[in-house]
Amino acid sequence: MRCSQAFLPVLKESPTDAQIVSHKLMLRAGLVRQTAAGIYAWLPIGLKVLRKIEQIVREEQNRAGAIELLMPTLQSADLWRQSGRYDAYGPEMLRIRDRHEREMLYGPTNEEMITALFRDEANSYRDLPRTLYHIQWKFRDEVRPRFGVMRGREFLMKDAYSFDLDEAGARQSYYTQLLAYLRTFQRLGIRAVPMKAASGPIGGDLSHEFIVLAPTGESEVFYDAEYEAVDWGRGDLQHGDAAGLQSMFDQISRTYAATDETHDEARWADVPATRQRTGRGIEVGHIFYFGTKYSAAMNFRVPGPDGQMITPHMGSYGVGVSRLVGAIIEASHDDAGIVWPDSVAPWAVGLVTMRGDDTASAAAADDLYAKLTAAGVETLYDDRDGRGGAKLASMDLIGLPQQLIIGPRGLAQGVVELKDRRTGEKQELSIESALARLT
Ligand code: ATP
Ligand code: MG
Ligand code: MG
Ligand code: MG
């Protein structure tokens, strides 16, 4: 993308209406603009990052055997009356009436809709187990939308739902999603600790929140430093390996991690003092086993092998895709701006001419841009006139992993500069070796 032809609004001043660093940086670097309280337009850079996160989430869901579909944002109130949640949900639900006075709502979550959909198509025990998911916008009329996309009213969520014939099967589905989450967050370049969460009326030990550690997080967290040593992606594990998944789960259960909601002073006291870590964190995912809560309420039963009717056991698994954009920035930035992990960077390389009006620099940069693009390296090329210093500051703000800097003086000696955004390390290289490095 050439900056001269792009839509990349960057703010020079720090916005005063933003309280936390990720929100400030998302406004300054032009990722989003608020259009109404808690509702955001995604500008090109923000959209690119959002799509990359979404794609990683999708790939790990698919790898875990979950099946993608897409449910609508608008739902009928009648569906929610089947589970009894229409009245229970309260003012967070945005309720809408259509021209025929039918009661509708903008979905805050999809347990009812997926249960009805799957119930109407599943004919026997052979149709289970299945885990279905979608990545769709949700609406929750939060009392206090704040921190930008972190607590929006409209937000993008991946939500998966598992259907199993019994509790043992449901546990396997839960562990499978747990592993998919560990891999997803690892690929996103963040450490998200699975913390035991309150499991509601069903009880048991099967609910975890995934928490990214950041001082601006809304939850207070307590965890064992062992979590810093775990191989989060569990590269050794296969999704179908029941015993392996169980031992992964047991290891997680043994290692203390809790938010203020579930913190247990007695168990905490057993964690050696040198390993006790406390801080704040952001909830980026939440997984839940809830047994037959919705299937029973919504009359979902399938005939088993012996003809006896079985009420499926369900779980649901959410990832805050749009919240993650903010959470990743909270976890990865410096004074100059965002520092994107490679996997979600909007472009891999920022190409800058220090003097856009210098014809030799422009020609060399045009040629590099063409070669990088041809090699499939996503490149943002600041081909505009204007001060090199300001261009570099914008590249730092936007946070692309590599900067390739072309100046008349270096060029005269056949060299360009390659800067690593994270370390700040700069190297002078010949054009050929810079290209070789990046392609
Ligand atoms: P919170 O405690 O932050 O209000 P929640 O527990 O109500 O979140 P869940 O119902 O568990 O949220 O939804 C799954 C995921 O959706 C959350 O883990 C979070 O990442 C994301 N999410 C929830 N509410 C919002 C919101 N208002 N804005 C952005 N993302 C959200
Ligand atoms: Mg909430
Ligand atoms: Mg929560
Ligand atoms: Mg939650």
Image (cartoon, helix red, strand yellow):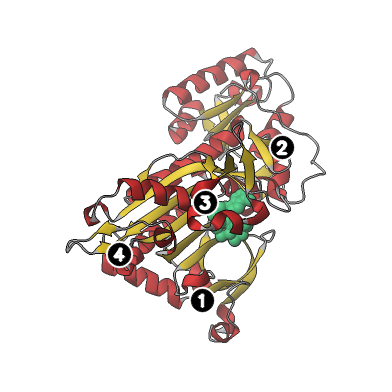
Instruction: Look at label 2 and name its amino acid.
Output: Gln
Q: Nearer the viewer, residue 346 or 60?
A: 60
Residues at discs 1 and 4 in contact (Cβ within 8 Å): no
Q: Which of the 4 quarters of the picture holds residue 376?
A: top left
Dot 1 falls on a residue whose secondary structure is loop
Q: Which mark is residue 360?
A: none
Disc 3 residue crowd, few under 14, some 14–19, many 20+, Cα 10 Å? many
Q: Secondary structure at mark 4?
A: helix
Residue on which the image places disc 1: 256
Residue 250 is situated, as x and y percent measured from the top left of the image, at 38, 74
What residue sits 65% from the left and 52% below the top? Answer: 92
Q: Nearer the viewer, mark 1 or mark 2?
A: 2
For the residues labelled 1 and 2, the Cα–Cα distance comes to 39 Å
Q: CA distance from mark 4 to mark 3?
A: 26 Å
Residue at label 2? 34
Q: Position of residue 66 (x, y in %)?
A: 35, 49
Which residue is at the front of the view, 316 or 232?
Answer: 316
What amino acid type is highlighted by mark number 4?
Answer: Gly
- Indicate which disc residue 80 carries: 3
Instruction: Please give the name of the residue rendered at 49% of the width and 57% of the height, measured from the top-left corner.
Output: 83
Among numbered discs 1 and 2, the one appearing first in the sequence: 2
Identify the residue position indicated by label 4 in the image.
Answer: 169
Q: Is mark 1 within 8 Å of ligand 3?
A: no
Query: Among all residues in the image, which is located at the extreme front?
Result: 100
Give amino acid for label 1: Tyr
Secondary-structure class at tag 2? strand
Q: Disc 3 marks which amino acid?
A: Trp
